Image: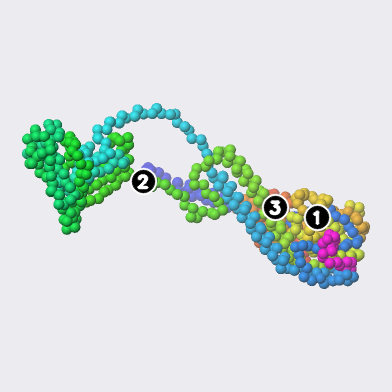
Amino acid sequence: MNLPANFPLKKVMITVVSVVIVIALIITGVAVAVNGKAANATVDVEQVSNISTQYWGDQSSTYGNATSDFVQELYPDKEKAISKIFVKEGDTVKIGDTLLQYDTTKLQLKVESKELEEKKKKYELEQAEKELTKLQNTAPYVEPVIPEPKPEPTPTPVPESQAELYTEITEHSKPFKGAGTEEDPYVFLCTEDAVLTKGFLLKLLGVTDPRATPTPTPTPSAEPTVQPSEAPTATPQPTVTPEPTAEPTTAPTEAPTPAPPIEPTEAPTPAPIEPTEVPTVSGMAWFKQMTFIKTNETGGESVPTPEPDFTLPDGPFVARFEVHEQDNENLPLVKGWQMDGDKISAGFFNEVISEPDDIQMPDLSNADPGISYDTGGSMYTAEELQQMIADKKQQIQDLKLNVKQAAHDLEKAKLDLENATIKSTVNGVVKSLTDLDTAMSTSSPFLVVSGGDGFYITASLNESLLGKVHVGDTVMASSWENGQMYEAEIVQISDFPNDNSNYYYDGSSNPNSSTYQFTARIADADGLKNGMGLDITLKAASDNASNAIYLFKAYIRSDDGGKYVLKVGDDNRVHKTYIKTGKTIYNQYLEIKSDTLTEEDYVAFPYGTSAIDGAKANDMEENTDENDGIDARGLDA
């Protein structure tokens, strides 16, 4: 931008600097005001231990009765073998005295068996889940759309065959194409059972018949040919006998005077082949002699044949023999073969359907052996797939229950192994001790200890609590009659489920599962009477029970940085402290998983005008005096 020469540039600079200074003063004033407010603000604080709780596991309720004469009874168990009994009838025992010892070898084998059973159930569940995944990923079968039928095209007329069909190929058979060379062989149309005559083979090989001097040749000859129509009986018939000493004879005197100009005495006679010459020749000469050794043994007069229209030239040449559909050379080839007279070989060229090279087999080298892989398209409709998926989900639910049952059986087997040593649960006397066979046959206990001091509670717990409730745990009992609370210690948990369960549960356990009887001893039994009914509360230890802090949710706030509390720092002022949280219990307390907060720390309620980062903790001096030298952070002053 071009400014005029007389533009007051100095005034513009002064204005810009003034605006910047004003803005800086405003920001500084706001910051001072905020800090001043935080410095002057005070906020009430509470110690974490007062607004938090601890979680020790789920609770379950049941019902039981108080008894003043508790009896400990031991029944025989087929799955357990007793290795030693430490008491005899009439002995006095106290709580904790060893009564007998079971053989741990059999119990250990039972644990291993239950472990294998659990692994099997888990494997079945995994396979079912994989099959479900496969079904969910399977595309349903879609009925293909059948196109409208197209009119069949008018078939192209096939030209009629112009070639002669041969069942016997001779030297006079005419090929329908070819020049007899390797590049362009003679081609004959023939049937599948066609045969080749000797004359054709001689032509193919280029071998000359040594007797063929009187036979007309395919090429023109200066000598006159005999016309068989003029004198059919006048043709001399040379007779060649197989005897080497026999002279070839003609019978001109027996025949009437021939009309043709050819005299019988002038007809050349073929020279007989001496048999003594056969052993002296070899190779092609021997082949020629053996080819023409056969003579006419029929005798009688020869029957003249008409002169052929075509005769193959002397070879060697190449010939091909083809068999076509419907014996028509214009239709597809069925089979064929080729012979080369120069190489004395036959080359077959039957058509062979080649295998397609676009077939792709699935790669199953890394396939899971527990899953069957479908290499073809899906044949299930959408409705069938939905039903199969629903059935598989139900199967998975059943398998999950089986896995839980297997885990429960394994836990029980481990408990049996741990409790292989049976101890007395009462202070009393061994009332009876019988042999195992008698006790087994009468379904009665083989060892009975009767106690007469104090009160005991007899009740039942759900099988889901086995392994979470142990001997030595404390339960709370309340009386319906006197309204008092009693604390009792579990001294025995039965190894066998109850035949029937008439105990009340609060719904936290499955009412359809088995129950096991347990006994708890009440140390202070004031006000109790024999047979009095009691409501019992059991605390099942959590799988991950710990000393974690569960802070009241009202003292936790969140922003873009996460959840935080206003925690008192070393300067007795509250500061925003971010925390990590876990699960919620009782809908009111949130688990604090980070180490930034302890039960001795103090926090402020994070809502309200005074809940400012940096505000002074209210009445911290009084808290310090009341806590005898403990400052706001719970540390020694």
Residue annotated with mark 2 = 354
Magenta extent: 427-445
Q: Which residue appears at 24% of the width and 41% of the height? A: 169
Residue 587 appears in the picture as rendered: yes
Tell me the quadrant of the picture where the C terminus can be found.
Answer: bottom right
Q: Which residue is mark 3?
A: 584
Closer to the eye: label 2 or 1: 2
558 lies left or right of 630: left
Which tag, 3 or 2, sits closer to the chain's start? 2
User: Callout 3 environment at 10 Å: few (<14), some (14 to 19), or many (20+)?
Assistant: some
Residue 311 forms part of the magenta stretch: no
Secondary structure category for the residue under label 2: loop
Q: How is the image coloured?
A: rainbow
Q: Where in the figure is residue 358, as x and y percent of width and height?
A: 40, 46
Q: The N terminus lies in which quarter of the figure?
A: top left
Distance CA(mark 3)–CA(mark 2): 72 Å
Mark 3 vs mark 1, CA separation in Å: 35 Å
3 or 1: tag closer to the N-terminus = 1
Sort mark 2 into few (<14), some (14-19) or many (20+) by Cα contacts within 10 Å. few
**Residue 522 % position (x, y):** 87, 62
Alpha carbons under labels 2 and 1: distance apart: 76 Å
Mark seen at residue 116: none
**Residue in view at x 68 percent, y 60 percent:** 114
